[in-house]
């Protein structure tokens, strides 16, 4: 599934040709795709000009001139393409937008999990989404508050879009490796220094992902270069680039997870720390 760097790359690539264009035609060919419904989405966007293309979490956001918004979530296999009269039509086209310059944008989605959501209230539609990790407001202190107010394993917590948006399986594994943290470490047991490392790692790995136009493993998202730079994800049994230990695969919260067992040792047990602090109090 595309994560923040892939969605951001798509936004940047499609922005120049979409911004300022008026939508003159729309079709959705997959009944469950459009929300509230395909006819309602069509009526709400036809004749409107796209003033801005943005991103919120893993959603691509079309800002329309009359105050409406169309959110596109690619989910597992959704992708945009431009219709090209000179080449064969792409497969799995689920929606099309005709634009006033004669171009046609296609939404292709083999697995049909992608969603198009029209709303006039962007804040309400995205109210359940958490912090944008690349925004200035996302500080180490904010991350500390989020981690220490919960007692959860790091991996599922970082995947939770209601806490931080944009991180999926790839960039969580990479962030945890770069921070030297085990994916099963408890969020409320991290030290300030560990949280600062994690905060830096999340932002650096996302920025690196954007710089290299995201990670490409298969046909669903071609063109990225970040896969060459991953340190643990998809590298099971290959030597750690830092210490040479073979990368291990494990399951954490039902998700395939990759770690270096040397660089990411299991967290110290809570009991040990409690005992130590009791001892100090005495
Ligand atoms: Zn290592």
Image (spheres, helix red, strand yellow):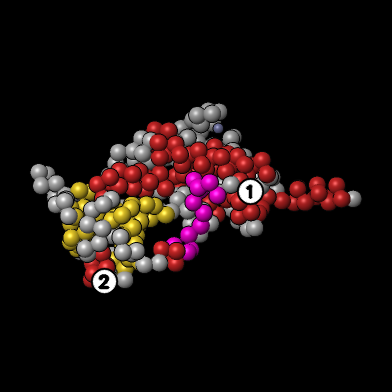
Residue 69 sits in which quadrant? Answer: bottom left
Q: Residue at x 54, y 42 (%)?
A: 176
At which x and y percent is residue 264? Answer: 59, 39
Secondary structure beneath disc 2?
helix
Distance, label 2 to label 1, CA atoms, is: 43 Å
Judge the density around disc 1: few (<14), some (14-19), many (≥20) Cα neighbours within 10 Å.
Answer: some
Query: Is 127 included in the stretch rendered in magenta?
Result: yes
Q: Residue furthest right?
A: 282
| Residue 40 locus on image (x, y percent) | 26, 71
> Can you see residue 16?
yes
Q: Residue at x 50, y 38 (%)?
A: 204
x and y percentages locating residue 115 in the rendered image: 32, 61
Q: Nearer the viewer, residue 184 or 55?
A: 55
Let me know if residue 255 appears in the view: no
Of residue 234 and residue 203, the one placed in the foreground of this image is 203
Q: Which residues are magenta?
A: 126-137
């Amino acid at each position: 599934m595309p994560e923040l760097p892939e969605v951001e790359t798509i936004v940047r690539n499609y922005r120049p040709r979409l911004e300022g264009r008026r939508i003159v035609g729309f079709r959705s060919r997959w009944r469950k795709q459009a929300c509230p419904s395909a006819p309602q989405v069509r009526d709400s966007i036809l004749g409107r000009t796209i003033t801005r293309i943005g991103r919120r979490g893993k959603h691509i956001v079309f800002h329309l001139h009359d105050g409406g918004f169309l959110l596109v979530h690619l989910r597992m296999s959704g992708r945009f393409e431009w219709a090209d009269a000179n080449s064969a039509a792409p497969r799995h086209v689920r929606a099309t937008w005709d634009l006033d310059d004669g171009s046609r944008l296609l939404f292709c989605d083999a697995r049909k999990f992608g969603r198009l959501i029209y709303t006039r209230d962007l804040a309400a539609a995205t109210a359940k989404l958490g912090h944008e990790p690349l925004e200035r407001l996302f500080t180490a202190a904010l991350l500390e508050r989020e981690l220490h107010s919960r007692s959860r394993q790091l991996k599922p917590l970082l995947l939770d879009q209601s806490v931080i948006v944009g991180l999926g399986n790839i960039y969580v594994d990479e962030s945890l490796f770069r921070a030297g943290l085990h994916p099963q470490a408890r969020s409320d047991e991290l030290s300030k220094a560990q949280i600062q490392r994690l905060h830096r790692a999340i932002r650096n790995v996302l920025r690196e992902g954007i710089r290299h136009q995201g990670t490409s493993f298969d046909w669903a998202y071609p063109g990225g270069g970040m896969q060459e730079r991953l340190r643990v994800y998809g590298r099971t049994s290959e030597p750690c680039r830092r210490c040479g230990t073979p990368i291990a695969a494990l399951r954490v919260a039902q998700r395939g997870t990759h770690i270096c067992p040397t660089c990411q040792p299991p967290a110290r047990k809570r009991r040990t720390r409690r005992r130590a602090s009791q001892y100090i109090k005495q």
